[in-house]
Image: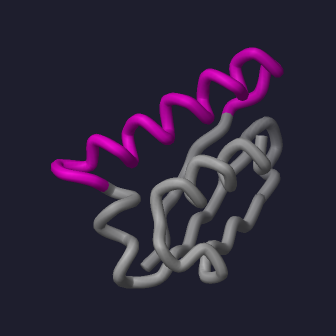
Amino acid sequence: MKEILESILKNLVENVNEISINQIEKDKLTIFEIKVAPDDMGKVIGKEGKIAKAIRNIVRAIGAREHKKVTVEFID
């Protein structure tokens, strides 16, 4: 799941080396904390948060297939 998320982000941002994905496991919940370069944050979030919402939906769908609850947080 982390690899798919990383692949999506690499195609969105210009500063690929500054992508950081931290995976946190809590009970039955997996949280992915994403950090990108400040210049790329707008590209990842998108207009009115549409790209961020799409990323969350994709990750949740993958998690549901594996019977896991998953969420994505974008960190400044």
- Above or below for 75 versus 65: below
Residue at the image position 82 percent from the left and 43 percent from the top = 27
* Residue 16 quadrant: bottom right
Query: Does 62 lie within the magenta span?
Result: yes
Query: Does 49 lie within the magenta span?
Result: yes
- Above or below for 49 versus 64: below
In front of the other: 5 or 7: 7
In front of the other: 62 or 8: 8
Quarter of the image with the C terminus is bottom left
Q: Is residue 43 left or right of residue 31?
A: left
Residue at the image position 69 percent from the left and 31 percent from the top = 69
Quarter of the image with the N terminus is top right
Residue at the image position 75 percent from the left and 15 percent from the top = 65
* Residue 4 quadrant: top right
The magenta stretch is 46-69
Residue at the image position 73 percent from the left and 67 percent from the top = 22
Query: Residue 35 location in percent, x, y?
Result: 55, 74
In front of the other: 50 or 14: 14
* Residue 9 quadrant: bottom right
Query: Residue 51 location in percent, x, y?
Result: 35, 44
- Please tell me whether the stretch drawn in magenta is mainly helix, strand or loop: helix
- Above or below for 40 versus 43: below
Q: How many labels does the image show?
A: 0
Query: Residue 34 location in percent, x, y?
Result: 58, 65
